Amino acid sequence: MMTAGRELTIDAKFAAKRRAWARKPAILNTEHRVYLGDGRRMSELGAESVHLVVTSPPYWNLKEYPDGIDAQLGNLADYRAFSKELRSVWERCFQLLVPGGRLCVVVGDVCLSRRKAGRHSVVPLHADIASMCLEAGFDYLSPIFWYKIANAATEVDGNGSTFLGKPYEPNAVIKNDVEYILILRKPGAYRNPTSEQRALSIIDRKDHDRWFRQVWTDVPGQARLQGHPAPYPKEVAFRLINMFSFVGDSVLDPFWGTGTTTAAAIDAHRSSIGYEIEPRYIEVGKARFQQGYIDAKVHFFESLGVAALSAPIEAQTRIVTTAG
């Protein structure tokens, strides 16, 4: 068991990890809640009740989201309106995080084509989100650059080749191959986990070396998942959860989508909470966990008042489906 009085050697830390896992402690039994509800509100949760937020917000109008949900941020045509609503999510996350807890945001800039916007330009969504989070009270930490390889068709009008512009001539468009993983921290004392949590959460040497680099080149992008236009790979969420939380912690995703963060939390032995406003994505997520995570306790709820999002959402919930 790891002690708080003195720091163990590296070899002793790995030995403590092996002993802790061999005991199969109760803290490994996690629970997962998913709400059909609005990530701007998350009224069911209390202040300072989550240890980590891992999420990937809508990329404004880059992807097409289902119609019919007026509160879907990805359907807001005006960027200023989109930014205003997105800001409220980060403000709420700040309230919900414990002091010292981190917010990890996987986000790409939005490339506007000449055909759609009249001229080629890039909306610096990552920079705007960073500014929103700073204004909400977060400290900004070194980001991770995820080299995911973009699809040129989402950036500019194609010419049937791999060029974004006139072949071999100056002023071509630089391909948008990088997404940003913003790392922000709520001010406060550093976390003080139990010695058991510390032992169970030790990261293997090889993984630590790969994960804590600022540029990730070893994680491919994720294709469309059963109708969701912008899923992100479970590997990204899994790394972030292991890097910035301890076994038994609670991880929040205010843009749950089809459940990538919850799936990663299950694998990492963390509990999770997700909010998703689109019912169709919830249904895809239910099927995902009923088929692939039979032993996991994933509970699906509906926030009362979710159908009328202009009215306050009550803190009470009623259960819709339990998977697992």
Image (cartoon, helix red, strand yellow):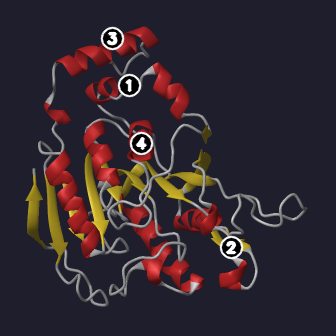
Q: Are marks 3 and 1 in contact (CB under 8 Å)?
A: no
Q: Relative to 143, is 23 on the left or the right?
A: left
Residue 15, disc? 3
- Badge 2 or badge 3: first in the primary sequence: 3
In space, the residues marked 1 and 4 are separated at their CA atoms by 18 Å
Q: Which residue occupies 38% across, 10% down?
A: 12
Task: Identify which residue, 157 or 211, lies in the foreground.
Answer: 157
What's the amino acid at mark 4?
Answer: Glu
What's the amino acid at mark 1?
Answer: Ile
The image quadrant where one finds the N terminus is top left
Residue 202, disc? 1
User: For mark 1, does the 10 Å Cα neighbourhood hold few (<14), some (14 to 19), or many (20 or more) residues?
Assistant: some
| Front disc: 2 or 4 | 2
User: For mark 2, does the 10 Å Cα neighbourhood hold few (<14), some (14 to 19), or many (20 or more) residues?
Assistant: some
Q: In what element is the residue under mark 3? A: helix
Give x and y (percent) for residue 303. 19, 75
Q: Which residue is mark 4?
A: 235
Q: In what element is the residue under mark 1? A: loop
- Badge 2 or badge 1: first in the primary sequence: 2
Q: Which residue is mark 2?
A: 157
Give x and y (percent) for residue 128. 62, 68
> Which image quadrant for residue 280?
bottom left
Give x and y (percent) for residue 206. 49, 22
Residue projecting furthest to the right? 170
